[in-house]
Image (cartoon, rainbow, N blue to C red):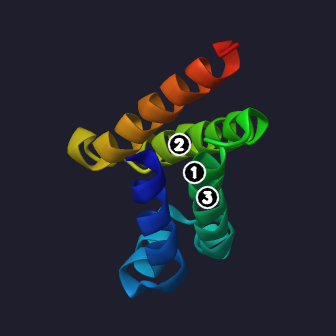
Amino acid sequence: MSAAAFLGYGIACLSSRRMDAEFRRYGLARFRRLVGTLECLGALGLLAGHFSPPILVLAAAGLTLLMILAVVTRVRIGDSLASTLPAIVLLVTNAFVLGVAITRP
């Protein structure tokens, strides 16, 4: 679920006018391509992590950090809880994946 969500968001971030407008609203327009690329790489890392646990740890950690920053950004600009909820859900999901990946024998 997380890999699909991040791949979708990453592609949208790289190609969508709506996401371009959103990043302008956040005051982070110069980081849009970087974020989109990191989301796509993180999604691919989650998938590759099925075969390589260290890649899973790196991907989940990176996506968790990205979502912490996303939640902070949403709070900073005064977005509603409903607008912030997708980032919160993805934050919790990836933190869970990271916790499982770290404790896996």
Task: Calculate the distance from the C-alpha at mark 1 to the C-alpha at mark 2.
Answer: 18 Å
Task: Calculate the distance from the C-alpha at mark 1 to the C-alpha at mark 3.
Answer: 5 Å
According to the image, label 3 marks what residue?
44
The amino acid on which the numbered mark 1 sits, given as a three-letter code, is Leu
Kindly identify the residue that appears in the image at 65 percent across and 16 percent down: 104
Q: Which is nearer the eye, 66 or 41?
A: 41
Disc 2: CA contacts within 10 A as few (<14), some (14-19) or many (>=20): many
Quick one: label 1 or label 2, which is nearer the N terminus?
Answer: 1
Split into 4 quadrants, where in the image is the C terminus? top right
Kindly identify the residue that appears in the image at 61 percent across and 41 percent down: 50
- Determine contact: label 1, label 3, CB under 8 Å: yes
According to the image, label 1 marks what residue?
47
According to the image, label 2 marks what residue?
67
**Residue that extends furthest to the left in the rendered view of this protein:** 82
- Residue 26: x percent and y percent? 49, 62
The amino acid on which the numbered mark 2 sits, given as a three-letter code, is Met
Quick one: label 2 or label 3, which is nearer the N terminus?
Answer: 3
